[in-house]
Structures are given as structure tokens and as C-alpha cells.
Amino acid sequence: MEKIICIPSYGYLIKLAEEAGKMILKGFTQGLKKEWKDDGTPVTEIDQKINDLVLSRFKRDFPEISVYSEEGSREVRGSDFKIICDPLDGTSAFLGGIPESTFCISLVVGGSPFLAVIYDPFLKRMWWAEKDKGAFLNGKKIQVSGHKELKKSIVCIAYWNKAPYHLHLVSNELMKQGATWMSPLSIAYFGGLVASGQIHATIFPGNKPLETAAMHLLVEEAGGKATDILGKPLVYDDGINDGIIEGHIISNGVFHDELQQIIEHVSVKESLNTLGYDR
């Protein structure tokens, strides 16, 4: 007899997001001390407290679901169900007193996102999506922008020292084509903006799916497109500790392929330059 697994509803994830949001707002005014992780990124007491909240709730309510979260995970071997979470996306902004941080969580089933929630507690904006049922912002159905070309588009590009794919050069190329680009403090926040049609794309070179999984479902359910940075499908089933992605392009879908081609062209050109070819 096949075992029945209980999974959370979008309402459960929304309530969890609201609870996390209260913790973010409370910590925002307290001048918290930061520490540094091995990868050189900051972490605060609030990151860890929200992470612990997520772990404890799922251990209590859904013990057969794995949790992969920024500050600590819990693996359930053999489970096809996984929570992917960034408890505080935008820690640097949070520490700098800039109100651009989000709580981001998704339920992945068999490698594909099934539920997603991104919550901005500062403006009380709750984005959520359920597979095949649409995307919503504060209960109102949303869709991506129909903007048709790179010219006058707004593209969010995340990059940092030694980030792959030469995205600093990609940003220059986009400006040449008349696009505006922004650097995110919370990549999940900008994913919400793509879904609700306020900007047109995000490009992310990182290999952790902490925000990408939720953004992926949210934007696809709003009518957009999500792939890895190489243009291949995004899959989240490579194991709880080894599951990595090749970045992402998440967009309104209209000029998605053009963005991928620009990234590929810049990467090939820089590789040739490294080898001593000037083309």
C-alpha cells in the first residue's frame, strides 16, 4: 500500500511567512550584531531564528518533508518532498537599515516547485503561487508585463566579486540596447516584481536554489518563463546537500531567449580573450 504524505497548503506557508515577517520587522529596529559566514556573506540572529522556526514547524507538522534552508537543513532520506527556504533574503540590506528584505519559501515535489511564497514585511506584500492555479499578490491574481523588447526594459542582475558568467559585462551590453539594469539587495523581492509586471527579468549566477525555486513557480504561474542561465530547465532534485543550479534567468518570457544569448555571447567572448584571442 502506497504511503500517503501530508503536505502544507499555501495558507500554511502564508501564515509562516507572516510570523517570519514579524520577526524581521522587530529585528530591523534593534541594531543587530552581524557575523560572517565562510562564504563571506553576513548573517544575523534573525536569520538563524527564522531558520529555526521553519525547521521546527516542519519537523512538528510535516516530518516526512525535507527542509533545505539557508542557515541549516533537515534531510528526510528518500522523500520526494522538499521545502526550500531563505529565511531572510537581503541580509545586507537588513543590516544597513534598508527595508528591502524578504522571507522566501517553496515546496518542491519531485524536483519541481508546487507552492511558493515571497513576503515583503515592510510593505505587507505577499506573493504566492500554486502549480496550475495562478500567481497572486495580496489575494489578487497577477501577470507578468507584456513589454516586448530589451529597449526600455528593466532587468535585475545579481553579481559579486568572482561571480561566474561575466554579468558585469552583460549589464553593459544591456545598457547599449537601451535597457535599465538594477542590482538587487533581495533577489526574491525582484522575482515578485517580475511576477506582478513591475520589472521584466532577473538574472542570477548563484548555484543555490534558495530563492530561485519560489521565483520560478511564481513567475511561471504569472505567465513568464524560468530557466537556468544556460537556457536549460530548472530542476531541484539533486539531493538535499548537493542540489545546485546553474543560476537562473527568470523573465516575462518575451525576450528571455535574447537575454540568454547575450550572456552566452559575452561568456564566449571573455573565454576567447582569456586564451589570447581578441575577437
Image: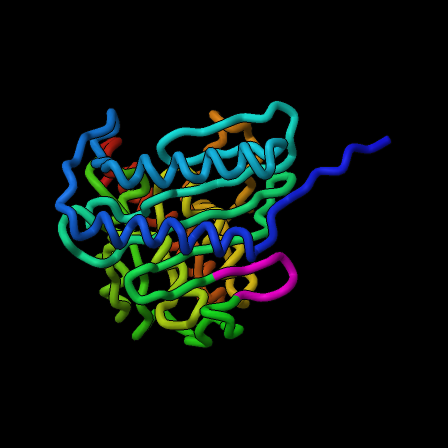
Within the magenta stretch, is there residue 37?
Answer: no
Q: Which quadrant is the N terminus positioned in?
A: top right
Residue 64, compared with residue 151, is above or below; it is: above
The residue depicted at 33 percent of the width and 43 percent of the height is 267
* Residue range corresponding to the magenta coloring: 128-135
- Please state the horizontal and vertical placement of residue 116, each as a whole percent of the image: 51, 53
Residue 221, compared with residue 185, is above or below; it is: below
Residue 114, compared with residue 143, is above or below; it is: above
Residue 156, compared with residue 61, is above or below; it is: below
* Towards the viewer: 57 or 220: 57
- Is any atom of residue 183 visible in this view? yes
- Is any atom of residue 279 visible in this view? no
* Towards the viewer: 96 or 50: 50
* Towards the viewer: 140 or 245: 140
Colour scheme shown:
rainbow
- Please state the horizontal and vertical placement of residue 246, each as a whole percent of the image: 43, 39
Left or right, 262 with reference to 255: left
Q: State which quadrant residue 150 falls in.
A: bottom left
Within the magenta stretch, is there residue 133?
Answer: yes
- Please state the horizontal and vertical placement of residue 129, each as a whole percent of the image: 54, 60
- Please state the horizontal and vertical placement of residue 119, each as a whole percent of the image: 39, 57
The residue depicted at 50 percent of the width and 74 percent of the height is 140
The residue depicted at 33 percent of the width and 71 percent of the height is 153
Q: State which quadrant residue 130 falls in.
A: bottom right
Furthest residue in direction right, as rendered: 1
